[in-house]
Amino acid sequence: MIINLPRKQSFRAVISSLLALVLALGPVFSGSPQAATMPQTVTTDVTVFDAEQKLSVELRLAVHGQPLLDTSWLLPNNRVEVLIVSNNVDIELKKLRESIVNAGGIIYYRYVSVKGLWAILPIDKLLTVAKRSDVTRIVPNRIARSSSFDLATTSGAAATAPAATALTTSNSVDGSGIGIAILDSGIMKSHQAFLDAAGKSRVKYGLDVIKASEIIKSNTSLTSTLIRDYSALIKPGSLLMEYGENLVSTMNDPSPDVYGHGTHVAGIAAGRRIPNAISQRFSGIASNANLVDLKVLNGQGQGALADVIKGIDWVLFNQKTYNIRVIVLSLSTDSTESYQADPLCQAVRSAVAAGITVVVSAGNFGKSLAGKELYGSIASPGNEPSALTVGSVNVHDSDLRNDDTVNYFSSRGPTRGKYLDENGVRRADNLFKPDLVAPGHRIVSAQASASGSFSNLATLYPELRLNPASATPTNSDLMTLSGTSMSAPVVAGAVALLLQKNPGLTPNLIKAMLQYTAQQLPDANLAQQGAGLLNIEGAIRLASVLRTDLKEAIAANSIKVGDSLLATGKTLPVPTSTIKGETFDWGRYIIAGGSHLFGGEVLFQKYQPIYDSSTLWVNDRAKKHSFVYSYNLLRTQKYLSGITDTALSNTPLMAPGVQNLDSILTASGVFVPGKMIAQEMLNGQGVSLANGIALADGIALADGIALADGIALADGIALADGIALADGIALADGIALAEAHHD
């Protein structure tokens, strides 16, 4: 059932005309969960102290009448705009929603990728809601801000380094048929870099998530008198959801990227070579992949946590329609929250469990304000174990790989998100990140324009344009940017190539393949480079020998630990690559369980249960991520309704014969050089798992670790000029940092 309404009709009028119908037919539109009705968790028996621990620092200050400056989430009449994360077994959070309405709040949206709500609450009711035992965390929906570094002085002159410098030799894969969702500032879909061979744009759909939120919030006064729970109306399959998406589609806007960051990111992942002399060295990685544009950052590179998670929700609802197999998040929030409670991390986890590889930037916080190398500076959601977190290297404008170095700005591990243990002690996650590194220094890609004007980035920093003398923008302009925001789409494009080569790959297996085939950088340690430098050539050769039905076999539960992972008649390739005449060994180890290293050919000869991407293993815990669906009776369709987690115990995670390399970490931990790990493994270090591995204690990096002189360990992230990132900030983190050129 589809109702076509005039586009010029106001959203207020639409609500007024449909409200009676929707309220009358609410049960029909919302459907009923596939699972049986579950018990409610409604007790409010925690202390005020415990309740305050569920609030972010900013909200605690607001409760005590001491709000921080720049509180865009602080609303008139002593109200706050927040995200409320729950542990309720009820998928639809009915009792929690009722309590928020009874407290005088307004609910804008119920997420499906997170057990949580986007809502408005009176400040004096924050503790009342936080006291509920089904509430785990409340954070503000703080507006994002772009990096505050000076592009003009740090970027240098326009460079000629290509997006894919020395990453791969020529091959037949180009990402055809694979959908990549870009959650950023928009994509200029009319840019020549995004046209296919027939001259049509490969941007298959575009949605302005920010505008959708603005429409909802502009009608707050209406909802305050008629209905206070929007989540009952705006959900998949509802009339308002469908109409609202049509209203904010960017498909009729040829240049929706006013800022210019998203277009550049999309060009790196999937841009085509443009036939003109100035751009001969530009080419994206997966040059024929399809793109989906979800605009979550505005014309100043600013956004909000609520919109980023809504964008992930949209991908989950529509992944089959556009064959979305990859998400790129070249943005970040602070990392003071543990991945366990961080709502953005939870949303990423859901997308991975749904079979989508989520590639995220590690962050640009690798150097302290005092100029010291800053460890523990991974940003969220890069601290999420299931994410494919990417750091940045400087290729020094060379096709050679042996001179590549980790950029000084690239965030280092381990992760430092904090949680309260069972004794009330605040501890850091201390998980190994990043997962690997890729080029991210002065990368050439598409330059956006909007309404005949240069993008805001190109206007503010004309030296970044490849043709800075041009007075009029065109749909073939290019520019250079640096940062982990540029490294992430390089890896995302590589993932699309792997999926075209072997569509049966899962996100967890893809991460392991990219790590195993990575090249070890000279003198770079585990916290700097992860498992090493991206090697697309090797990963594609590895993908070509693995069975192509793995995803289906996992879904059907027809594959078990130790079963062959190789395609019939195939053997593992030689673990070396030759690119541009340079031959190098693969690292041949992976990071798993958050704090473990494993190596050996058995990793890809035999099936490892950790390759099931609905399984999350961190240290001594593992859990299974599942989805619940609801049915829309009018349209006879089912829609994703929510998530459930089930703890796993005595569950096989690794097959016998895999090498446990944790002993190599004994002396140096995350500071051990990658080359040493690879060499020690070849020298016979490590322990072959005779019986595989189920659940074992992880290796924790103690809070009081002694560091060498000049090494700083972060507890959270700070920007320039003393601005501290707080919960809910999203930022385009790859626009500002570049190192001086070195030959």
Image (cartoon, grey):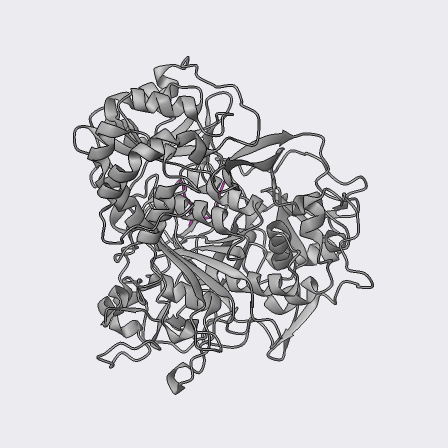
Task: Provide residue 574's location: percent of width, then percent of height.
Answer: 74, 67
Closer-to-camera residue (414/440) = 440
Magenta: main secondary structure equals loop
Rendered position, 28 above or below 181: above
Q: Inspect this view and state whether residue 522 appears.
A: no
Dividing the image into 4 quarters, which one contains the C terminus? Answer: bottom left
Rendered position, 691 above or below 138: below
Q: Report how many numbered discs are placed on residues in the image.
A: 0
Q: Magenta stretch: residue 524 in it?
A: no
Closer-to-camera residue (631/559) = 631
Task: Provide residue 369's location: percent of width, then percent of height.
Answer: 32, 51
Rendered position, 54 above or below 267: above
Closer-to-camera residue (673/353) = 353
Task: Provide residue 531's location: percent of width, then percent of height.
Answer: 59, 56
Left or right: residue 114 versus residue 717 is right
Quadrant in the rendering for residue 613: top right
Report the span colored magenta: 706-715
Task: Provide residue 243's location: percent of width, then percent of height.
Answer: 34, 48
Q: Residue at x 31, y 47 (%)?
A: 212
Dividing the image into 4 quarters, which one contains the N terminus? Answer: top left
